[in-house]
């Protein structure tokens, strides 16, 4: 089997919306759900009643995603809202993220698992700082596809020249990014539904797809057998019972490593390397609630048994013997700082949570911060405040087993947690380990 994806999720697309305040993100999602007939009648009635109470001149479809009371009162998005819908061609998970600059951390959270980002631009304003910020974050988070949604075209009389200039300005900025995603520009009016689900009669000069058509047909990465196999151990299952099980045999001797298959695949009989001991063994069984399996599927959970008595526990990792991962204590990483009452500086200490592992870590150096508007790297400041983005060097109390974020978004990402408050204060993406400079793989940059 060449394509190893979950059959129930083979057509799943996760996407996020981003843009400045009042660019129409929530309205776009509401219009998408409404025009694709993906909302229930009682939901629509509730939105209509809320719109009347607010004094809106029309049904405010943004209320479908703005669920917090503060959001409805202020007319802005604050929290990340997840919505699910499906068409005959595909299933979708939407993360509607805030546009305010102080909620950049929310955008990072919502976009961390996205395959595609819809970046909205108000046709009257063009490319602004938040457009640049969100585009940079999409590139940093390795989102492979961007839809440049030039919204509110009805307010500029559907002028093609306005649209063309915005697209040109956006491409001029995006050309300076290290990793440029695939960009598909679409002119639209989310309020009226132009080019959202159906092609607009008001913009005959646009010959591309409507938004929904593009979302249904865009090709995103699916895990294959070519991906490196990564299985983070979450728990060691030891029933310690004298009874026998028809599927598992004598439970007194059963010792399974439970966890989720982050990427790649295992088969019974595969030679594996088990961290942290780095001992080699062979897979003897792959078990689920439904019974024994011959092969794993990415992103699903399993209990795996091996031929030898190997000491590993939560935080360990199982990989194929010919696909070793990095095991260093010190590395460079890009981070987005989340905390508003605490700053990061050299010698700051945190708990670092990576896959199922939790280790203490210290910041040994702040290498640079990124100016989102100019993409310039500044080395003058050694302190991170809320929403700052840049590169730091970390040293952990114990080795991590990881890949660069460029190669694996699951094993290349982590969060930093404050030791006193237990609050998550940063999201990080590992660039490279601090090993020999001659190792080309170590020189991958983000």
Image (spheres, rainbow, N blue to C red):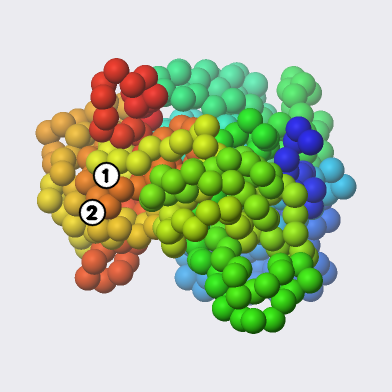
Q: Residue at x 61, y 57 (%)?
A: 304
Q: Residue at x 25, y 58 (%)?
A: 360
Quadrant in which the C terminus is drawn: top left
Instruction: Please state the horizontal and vertical placement of residue 197, each as a whole percent of the image.
Output: 78, 42
246 shown above or below 257 = below
Instruction: Please state the horizontal and vertical placement of residue 173, each as a whole percent of the image.
Output: 43, 22
Q: Which residue is mark 1?
A: 329
Distance from label 1 to label 2 (Cα)? 7 Å
Pointer 1 local density, CA inside 10 Å: few below 14, some 14–19, many at least 20: some
Q: Nearer the viewer, residue 250 or 377?
A: 250
Is 51 situated left or right of 361 in this image? right
Q: Nearer the viewer, residue 301 or 324?
A: 324
Q: Residue at x 30, y 58 (%)?
A: 359
Disc sitting over residue 397 in the figure: 2
Residue most toward the right?
88
Q: Do the CB atoms of the residues marked 1 and 2 lie less than 8 Å apart?
A: yes
Is 179 situated left or right of 7 in this image? left
Identify the element where label 2 is drawn. Answer: loop
Q: Nearer the viewer, residue 97 or 273?
A: 273
Instruction: Please state the horizontal and vertical placement of residue 380, each as a whole percent of the image.
Output: 12, 33
Disc sitting over residue 48 in the figure: none
Q: Residue at x 58, y 63 (%)?
A: 256
Residue 227, quarter of the rendered image: top right
Quadrant in which the N terminus is drawn: top right
Which of marks 2 and 1 precedes in the sequence? Answer: 1
Residue most toward the bottom?
242
């Amino acid at each position: 089997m060449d394509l190893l994806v979950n059959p129930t999720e083979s057509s799943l697309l996760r996407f996020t919306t981003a843009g400045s305040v009042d660019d129409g993100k929530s309205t776009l999602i509401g219009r998408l759900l409404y025009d694709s007939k993906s909302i229930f009648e009682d939901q629509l009635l509730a939105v209509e009643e809320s719109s009347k109470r607010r004094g809106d001149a029309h049904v405010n479809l943004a209320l479908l995603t703005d669920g917090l009371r503060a959001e409805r009162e202020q007319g802005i998005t604050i929290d990340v809202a997840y919505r699910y819908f499906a068409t005959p061609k595909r299933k979708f998970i939407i993360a509607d993220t805030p546009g305010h600059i102080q909620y950049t951390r929310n955008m990072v959270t919502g976009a961390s698992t996205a395959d595609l980002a819809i970046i909205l631009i108000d046709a009257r304003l063009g490319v602004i700082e938040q457009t640049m910020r969100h585009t940079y974050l999409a590139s940093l988070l390795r989102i492979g596809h961007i839809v440049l949604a030039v919204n509110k075209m009805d307010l500029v009389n559907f002028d093609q020249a306005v649209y063309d200039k915005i697209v040109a300005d956006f491409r001029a900025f995006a050309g300076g990014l290290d990793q440029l995603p695939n960009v598909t520009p679409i002119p639209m009016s989310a309020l009226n539904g132009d080019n959202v689900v159906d092609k607009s009669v008001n913009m005959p000069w646009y010959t591309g797809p409507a938004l929904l058509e593009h979302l249904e047909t865009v090709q995103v990465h699916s895990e294959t057998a070519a991906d490196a196999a990564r299985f983070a151990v979450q728990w060691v299952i030891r029933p310690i019972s004298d009874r026998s099980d028809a599927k598992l045999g004598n439970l007194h001797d059963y010792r399974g490593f439970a966890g989720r298959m982050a990427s790649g695949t295992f088969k019974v009989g595969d030679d594996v390397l088990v961290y942290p001991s780095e001992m080699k063994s062979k897979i003897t069984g792959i078990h689920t609630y439904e019974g024994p399996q011959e092969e794993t599927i990415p992103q699903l959970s399993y209990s795996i048994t091996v031929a030898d008595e190997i000491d590993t526990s939560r935080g360990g990792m199982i990989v194929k013997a010919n696909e070793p991962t990095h095991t260093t204590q010190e590395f460079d990483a890009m981070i987005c700082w989340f905390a508003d009452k605490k700053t990061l500086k050299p010698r700051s200490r945190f708990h670092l949570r990576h896959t199922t592992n939790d280790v203490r870590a210290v910041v040994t150096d702040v290498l640079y911060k990124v100016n989102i508007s100019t993409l310039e790297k500044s080395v003058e400041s050694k302190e991170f405040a809320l929403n700052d983005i840049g590169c730091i060097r970390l040293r952990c109390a114990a080795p991590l087993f990881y890949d660069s974020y460029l190669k694996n978004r699951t094993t290349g990402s982590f969060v930093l947690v404050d030791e006193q408050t237990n609050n998550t204060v940063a999201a990080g993406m590992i660039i490279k380990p601090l090993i020999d400079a001659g190792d080309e793989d170590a020189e991958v940059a983000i």
